[in-house]
Amino acid sequence: MKRKYEGIIILNTIGKDEAIDKMINRVGETIEAQGGKLEQIDRLGRKEFAYPSNKIAAGFYVNYFFEAEPQDLEKIRVALKLNDEVHVQHYQVLAA
């Protein structure tokens, strides 16, 4: 049974500020390649962290809304964990 998810992804943009669009598209392609169906992408922008995280002081926040099977969500997490451009990822279920 497919569920709707919201995924907040923080991208590591150190030295890559001109390639943000490509990074956002690559994450979206990864979500779709692992079985998700993208519905919407919201760019929340670059924000400073309250304290440095792994020697990174800021990141580019992107909100992905997609539909996927629960087992596909785990595939998405693993695939994005291997992506050096993804600093943090968090997901929540919007509807069953």
Image (cartoon, rainbow, N blue to C red):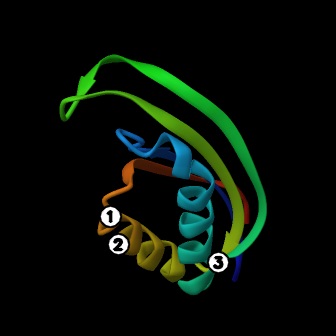
Q: Which label belongs to residue 36?
A: 3
Please give the residue where the numbered disc 2 appears in the rendered image.
78
Please give the residue where the numbered disc 1 appears in the rendered image.
81
Cα–Cα span, label 3 and label 1: 16 Å
Seen in the picture, residue 92 relative to 10 is either above or below; the reply is: below
Q: Position of residue 18 (x, y in %)?
A: 54, 45
Cα–Cα span, label 1 and label 2: 5 Å
The residue at the far top in this view is 50
Mark 2 vs 3: CB contact within 8 A: no
Is residue 8 visible in the rendered image? The answer is: no
Cα–Cα span, label 2 and label 3: 14 Å
Mark 1 vs 2: CB contact within 8 A: yes
The residue closer to the viewer here, 2 or 86, is: 86
Left or right of 24 in this view: 40: right
Disc 3 element: loop
Q: Position of residue 82 (x, y in %)?
A: 29, 69
Q: Amino acid at mark 2?
A: Val
